[in-house]
Image (cartoon, rainbow, N blue to C red):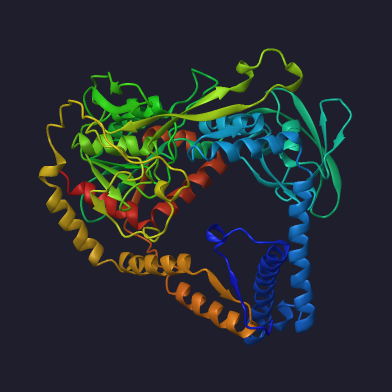
Amino acid sequence: FSVNETFDSDVEHMPYAKNEAEIRERWRLALKYQTLSRLVNKLERQEKAQEEGNPEEVEMKSFALLEEEARQQVRKTYAEYFRRLERMDIADRRSDYLNAIAAVYDPHTNYFPPKDKEDFDISMSGRLEGIGATLREENGFIKVMSIVPGSASARQGQLEVNDKILKVAQGAEEPVDVVGMALDEAVKMIRGPKGTEVRLTIQKIDGSEMIVPIVRDIVVLEETYAKSVILENGQSADRIGYIHLPKFYVDFQDPQGRRCATDVAMELEKLQADGIDGLVLDLRDNGGGSLQDVVEMAGLFFDYGPVVQVKSRDDVPTILSDRDRKVHYDGPLVIMVNAFSASASEILAAAIQDYDRGVIVGSPHTFGKGTVQRFVNLDNYIRGGDEIKPLGEMKLTTQKFYRINGGATQLRGVESDIVLPDAYSLLEMGEKDQAYCMPWDEINPVGFKPWDRPVSAVLPDVQAASAARVAQSEFFQLTRENAERLKARQDQQQYPLELEAFRAERARTEAEAKRFQGIRPVFEDLEITTLSADVAHIEADSLRKKRIDTWHSNLRKDPYVYEAMEIVKDLP
């Protein structure tokens, strides 16, 4: 590591290598960079232990030995990577091939093998039939990473985090060895219908082995669903409802299953029963979901009317409208968004903005995904061929959606009415930065009746009040500086491979990063109240209560939620 050379990490913009020698040189530099990074980590760990007077905490080793360890770690990482490549079966290769073709049409047209489609449905419904454990493949073993609270595994009690699963048996059948098996194949064996038994032969962290029988059940992933609390602080007597919606979920397999529009309507009912003076609906990091549900959800906040237009390549636009004449909540409203709020989140934010119903708060603009997809089951297109089915499904982009004012959200997203400093606001991470994305365009607007108490009438004053608070916030000022730092880091593509130069660069970047660590304040005056209707349900399960307490703790350290609360107080 004494040669003065650099590693270029910008592989996306590199020309194709001219020959094998150039490929080998690129690999050499990449491997050298990864080895050097690990080596410096080891050196710094030893030096820190010595500086702090705790050399016994780290086994002191020579430079040569540390370098050899770093090389072996990189070797092991790539050995595992190539092992996974070699184990790819025909289904894996077909998936890669079809997705490579599909990606050229747009970023959201994808092929879903049967297992991936099953996982997608689970993520959208928040439910599956299984044991309730998160698993990961590690060095050829299937390892337990977490246990879902309230699941079959949690109730059975013997399966624990860090256990290794050695064998899987269905009921009284002979066990099958899963060591070295692909994770997807092992998961397929462990999941199964509610009420059936799976027997896991596991190895504990102390090396002992045991058989754990678990009766499969419905696993409910609570983090999928809408939840709400009431926020207060000492600056006013206002009680502000807060709803967190992580995705626009729906159960595609069960028409009677949970749907986000119904759940949010229920949360609104519970909040208003406890008494609120304003509402914050948090759509940050919400990547979208059910189109039908977002149309219904928008209608919770205004009278019936158009919500969004959808249009395929040649058709006239179709107007999707809310038909419910009931306004479920008519008070002050703030919608929180960020650069990862996409698709259905953008439909809802755009509708609220176009109706002049509420204030959009957050990043300069949302993600910019303005396209509609539908799933097509490939089995329906092949007569016979049972020996090769199921073939999986294609998620096809079939339409674009447009605001009721005629503009698309594609590429541009929805611009916030009040922009809060965001560490990621300058980074390339939206739809416009995807390959083969569709262009922005617009169509004719549709007629609609704006909200009779338009927020635009008071928006300048509300914006000014928020700007004054943000200007006084050390967190938001540092966040602006951090955004510039992260942008510079993203633009940096060249890394020195000479040891001292690498360490100097590492020290500089770590010193910069340290300025922005732990800058989130804790709002001690923020009082968070669980809804009356939820208390018994939460108190009945200690794990659920612990999870809710953690959520409350995180809310107290969220300046964006605190500012959104102050903004909604300023609305009439």
Query: Farthest residue toward the top?
Result: 383
What residue is rendered at 64% in x and 31% in y?
113
Q: Is residue 527 left or right of residue 189?
A: left
- Could you tell me residue 517's position as x and y percent? 45, 69
- Could you tell me residue 301's position as x and y percent? 25, 31
Q: Is residue 54 left or right of residue 295?
A: right
In this view, 329 is above or below 420: above
What number of labels is visible? 0
**Which quarter of the image is occupied by the C terminus?**
top left
Q: Is residue 389 left or right of residue 294?
A: right
In this view, 527 is above or below 332: below
Query: Farthest residue toward the left?
Result: 457
**Which quarter of the image is occupied by the N terminus?**
bottom right
Judging depth in this view, the residue of 21 and 348 nearest the camera is: 21
What residue is rendered at 67% in x and 68% in y?
34
- Could you tell me residue 276's position as x and y percent? 25, 39
Q: Is residue 185 visible?
A: yes
Quadrant of residue 443 in the image?
top left
What residue is rendered at 80% in x and 79% in y?
65
- Could you tell me residue 285's position as x and y percent? 43, 46
Quadrant of residue 505 in the image?
bottom right
In this view, 553 is above or below 218: below
Judging depth in this view, the residue of 428 and 61 nearest the camera is: 428
Judging depth in this view, the residue of 13 and 182 nearest the camera is: 13
Q: Is residue 156 visible?
A: no
